[in-house]
Image: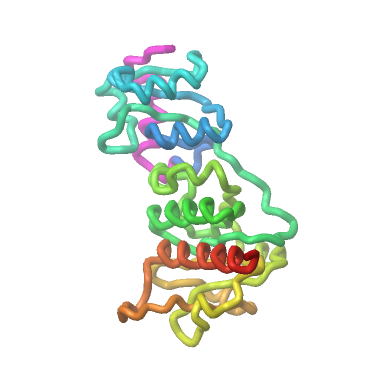
Amino acid sequence: MKTVTSRDNPLVKRLHALSASTSQQRRADFVLAEGIHLAGSFLDAGGVPRQCVISESALDDVETRQVLERIASERIVMLPDALFKQVSTVVSGVGLLLLLDRETPPVPPTIEHDCVILDGLQDAGNVGSILRSAAAAGVRDVFCATGTAYAWSSKVLRSGMGAHWHLRIHEHVEAVDLLARLRVPLALTDSHGAQAIDATDLSGPLAWIFGNEGGGVSSAWREVDHLRVTIPQPGGMESLNVAAAAAICLFEQGRQRRAARR
């Protein structure tokens, strides 16, 4: 284990820049995953971190020590608590940060299975929650259209709670390119004139698209043939949060498939 005490150290300066700026994180070739849960889920998925950075006081934490036992000592760097706070991406954490290589899987030439498309979602919490629901529902490919919040930002990673390690996440996808590859129906939620989701056959593979929190799905997607479903809301609300709507859609599809098998 190496100890670094200077804020002028190149690693510390790089971490400080990344922790303070999502745009810097987007331009980097690695990502920051902070906290016990993210570190544990990454290691459980067979990942090997580029580097592990810990605070001095983190060594007093039992769970942190258990994580460190799974990482080669030459990859671990310890910072004094005050210095670690300067590079941390959370307000109050245990003092454990992993630097991970960012995965950039190629877009498949044809898409014949369930997938999720995020069209201009801006809120990192919503993006992370949808990634988490997609992973839990067994979806493997998520396509982030240009304009969507950076899927590997620290905020999205925390909201995703480890979902990233179970997904193939494709960023900067253009509608024209993706539509040419889709071999499954496109499905979206619509509060006007659509069929209730529980009365719609969702048993086949679908490409679910979820749009911007304010503007919804863009015209590039609406202008092609698509399946429109609505989520009944007897309580009288006009709409649902997009992450909640995505979870309902994905798990209703799963419910129908389980019912069909029975």
Residue 178: percent from left, percent from top: 66, 63
34 shown above or below 242: above
Identify the residue shown where x is 57% and y is 48%.
167
- The quadrant in which residue 83 appears is top left
Residue reaching furthest to the right: 109
Count of marks, rendered view = 0
Residue reaching furthest to the front: 262
Residue 106: percent from left, percent from top: 68, 48
25 shown above or below 243: above
Depth check: 236 or 32 in front? 236
208 shown above or below 8: below
Q: Is residue 57 a member of the stretch shown in magenta?
A: no
Q: Is residue 180 left or right of residue 189?
A: right
- The quadrant in which residue 66 appears is top left
Q: Is residue 123 left or right of residue 223?
A: left
Identify the residue shown where x is 59% and y is 51%.
170
Q: Quadrant of the C terminus?
A: bottom right
Any part of residue 230 in sight: yes
**Region in magenta:** 1-24
111 shown above or below 162: below
Residue 109: percent from left, percent from top: 74, 56
Identify the residue shown where x is 31% and y is 81%.
236
Identify the residue shown where x is 53% and y is 80%.
199
Residue 59: percent from left, percent from top: 33, 18
